[in-house]
Image: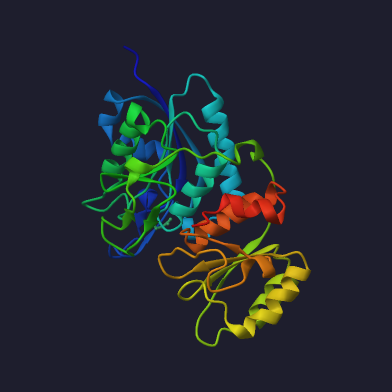
Amino acid sequence: MALPRIRILATGGTIAGETCPGGDITRYRAGVRPVEALLTAVPELGALATLDAEQILSLDSKDMTPDDWLCMLSAACQALADPAIDGLVLLHGTDTLEESAYFLHLALPTGKPVVLTGAMRPADHPEADGPANLLAAVKLAASAEGVGKGVLVVMNGKPHGARHVRKARTSGLDAFESDPDWTTARPDGRFASLARAPLPRVDILPGYAGAPAKLIDACVADGAQGLVLALSGHGSVPSAWEPSLRRAREHGVAILRASRCAGPVIRNANADDDREGWLTAGDLPPPKARVALMLALAAGWDSATRQTCLPTF
Ligand code: SIN
């Protein structure tokens, strides 16, 4: 029987990282090693799938921008539209992996498996985790288990759904977690027809003791079309912010209440969202709520419809 054909799209990250000359293993450069070298280091891949690979970016994912998301989306759409390709694996830095995974989860057509993976240790680490993660990702992308769950992430031998995965720890092989786990994951793809629409600017503003309202005015003056408020507790808006938020709404800027806590932020609880015209993030953390809002704005959804791309609880 023919092996499944899997396309690998490489974007950089620690999985492609190399230790700086003379440095210790905590000092390395991400996104250096080309994808061909990463595949050659894992000869077991040949027994799982027929692979072809494309280096689409070479970044440390802290530097990833929405334009880079569109670049990934375009390469992923092209691969998935190819009838010869059975599944897709994206190699990505771990720092913003959950944002890219959620963006692709909402924006890619559903059907074929799409799996993101990365590594917590650079490729030249004596106990690099990249090879095992790559093997696990290709295995999942080539299997029936990877179908019907939307975009998945594999790290440290564990699959996660894009909706709930997060990098919960700065270091350690078990840095990623998801709750609920991936067995509950469902496909989404509600923005799949948007493939190449430009993404509007949406900023995240943290709420903290004494956070100045001027930051809101500055973001609006600088062109933000949406603001995600990463607030304390139940998404509690500081009183001092209210005049600036009302001015922002008058300028047509979308305002979304999210929380620094694990959620949920419930609509019209603790704030009059209907009266103010605010959106609420449900249990989406601020970076993922931002992704959903950017896509809703890009799709031209009106303010009443925007809430439908966010959990309401
Ligand atoms: C990155 O996110 O590109 C660097 C960190 C990592 O991949 O773990």
Question: Could you tell me which residue is drawn at 29 percent across and 38 percent down?
Answer: 136
Question: Could you tell me which residue is drawn at 48 percent across and 76 percent down?
Answer: 232
Residue 170 in picture, x, y percent from top left? 33, 65
Split into quadrants, the picture shows ligand 1 in the one at bottom left
The image shows residue 219, relative to residue 63, as above or below, that is below
Residue 108 in picture, x, y percent from top left? 55, 37
Q: Residue furthest left?
A: 127
The image shows residue 191, relative to residue 247, as above or below, that is above
**Residue placed most toward the observer, 31 or 99:** 99
76 sits to left or right of 164: right
Q: Residue furthest top?
A: 1
What colouring does the structure picture have?
A: rainbow
**Residue placed most toward the observer, 126 or 279:** 279
**Residue placed most toward the observer, 30 or 199:** 199
Residue 66 in view of the camera: no
Residue 69 in picture, x, y percent from top left? 57, 48
Question: Could you tell me which residue is drawn at 43 percent across and 24 percent down?
Answer: 86
Q: Quadrant of the N terminus?
A: top left
Q: Residue furthest bottom?
A: 210
**Residue 90, located in which quarter of the rendered image?**
top left
Question: Could you tell me which residue is drawn at 50 percent across and 86 percent down?
Answer: 209
Residue 70 in picture, x, y percent from top left? 60, 45
**Residue placed most toward the observer, 174 or 290:** 290
The image shows residue 294, relative to residue 170, as above or below, that is above
Residue 269 in view of the camera: yes
205 sits to left or right of 301: left
